[in-house]
Each structure stands twice: as C-alpha cells, then as structure tokens.
Image: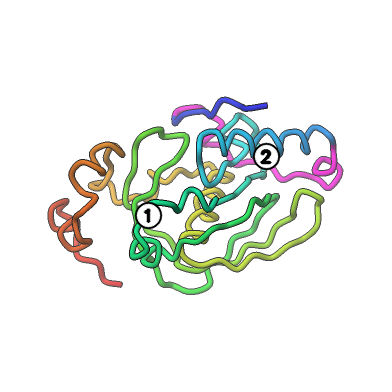
Amino acid sequence: MQQTILQVGAPVLRQRARPLSLEEIRSESIQRLIESMRETMREAPGVGLAAPQIGYSIQLAVVEDRAEYLEGIPAEALAQRERAQVPFHVLINPRLYLEHHAVVEFFEGCLSLTDYVALVPRAVEVRVECLNERGEPIAIQARGWYARILQHEIDHLHGTLYIDRMLSRSFMSAENLARYWQDQSQEELYAALGLPPRLH
C-alpha cells in the first residue's frame, strides 16, 4: 500500500530513529512496511526512502536507482556523478563510515522537500554496515551517486535533511534549476551564485 510522504516541518523528520530488533525485523508488520516503502518510493518516483519520511521513527530505509531513471541523462553527466543502476535493497540499523576525505558537490533533492534542490557536499566513497530485510548483517561499499544516496537516506534516520548540509546560496526550485542553470559549467554556476571556487 502506497504511503503519504511527509514534508519538511513534520516532527518525525527531525527525530533520531530507534533501531529495530531482530524479532521486529522478521515480523509481518515490518515486512509489509518494507513492501509499502518500495511501492511508495517507486511511485514518487525516488531513489531512496527512509521510514521517518512516512511517519515511522525506526532505522529502516530502502534504496533503488532504476535503469529507467538513467535514460535521457547524458553519458558525460552519468560519468561525472559516477551514477549507475542500483538494485533494490533494504538498510536496517545502518552504520556509515566515510572511506576517505574526498568530497563532491552536486544538486540533490528530497521527496520530503518536494520540487526543491541544492548543491550538497557528500563523501565520494562510503562503507555501510547494516542488516538486510531478513536481519542478516551486510556490508556495502559504494562510490559516487550510490554513496550519495546512502548518505542522504542514513541522514534521515538521524533527523538530518539535506538542507542542513547544503550550500545555502544554491537552494532553488527544481524548475529554476532546469530553466536557468542546467547548461552552466560548474565554474559558471559557482561564480553566478557567488560561491567560492571548488577546491577539490
């Protein structure tokens, strides 16, 4: 069943979510919730969804970057973002580790801030240790856009939104990004927005 995605200002989006026990993970209610989150994420559409976004303050998120989402994006842009298809999977009680200090900035949006985007600095490479939907421990190594998605969703589980990390002068509507800035080079964009040049 598709769920309503809460928007910024909902108190649950600012709470630290609680971890799930193995018994809870394997329960019918959590299994149903995972299926509901998959449906809700795909319908939105989005590449990730955290349980707090639909009102559940628990450490559960789903991720999927489908091949169809990459269609129409220039190969150069995909390469720059290191973006590729990511199959559906579940993160429960995740722990995030930054693999090195390299950081990149790209425009990022959120299903809980509909139709807005901003430049957000994120680590290029991360490792995540978590449980899957069966309560089994898994470790994920991720680079590029996949690493960005993981950081974004895990932030949700700690009450953090991308607006807490964004370069505030870059905050804009998605419509205006497409209208005014989509074809600008990174250097032109930073200069026009009055942002300091990138050092990385």
Amino acid, disc 1: Ile
Give the magenta-colored segment's residue range.
Answer: 9-27
Q: Nearer the viewer, residue 6 or 45?
A: 45
Q: Locate the N terminus by quadrant.
A: top right
The vertical placement of 17 against 105, above or below, is above
The vertical placement of 199 against 38, above or below, is below
**Magenta span has 56?**
no
**Magenta span has 16?**
yes
Which of the two labelled residues, at mark 2 and mark 1, occupies the earlier sequence position?
Answer: 2
Secondary structure at badge 2 equals loop
Q: How many marks?
A: 2
Q: Residue 45: where, in percent of width, then height?
A: 50, 38
Neighbourhood count class around disc 1 (C-alpha, 10 Å): few under 14, some 14–19, many 20 upward:
few
Tell me if 23 is positioned left or right of 87 in this view: right
Q: Locate the C terminus by quadrant.
A: bottom left
Task: Say which residue appears at 22% left-offset and 61% top-offset.
Answer: 186
Amino acid, disc 2: Ile
Q: Nearer the viewer, residue 113 or 196?
A: 113
Residue for badge 1: 73
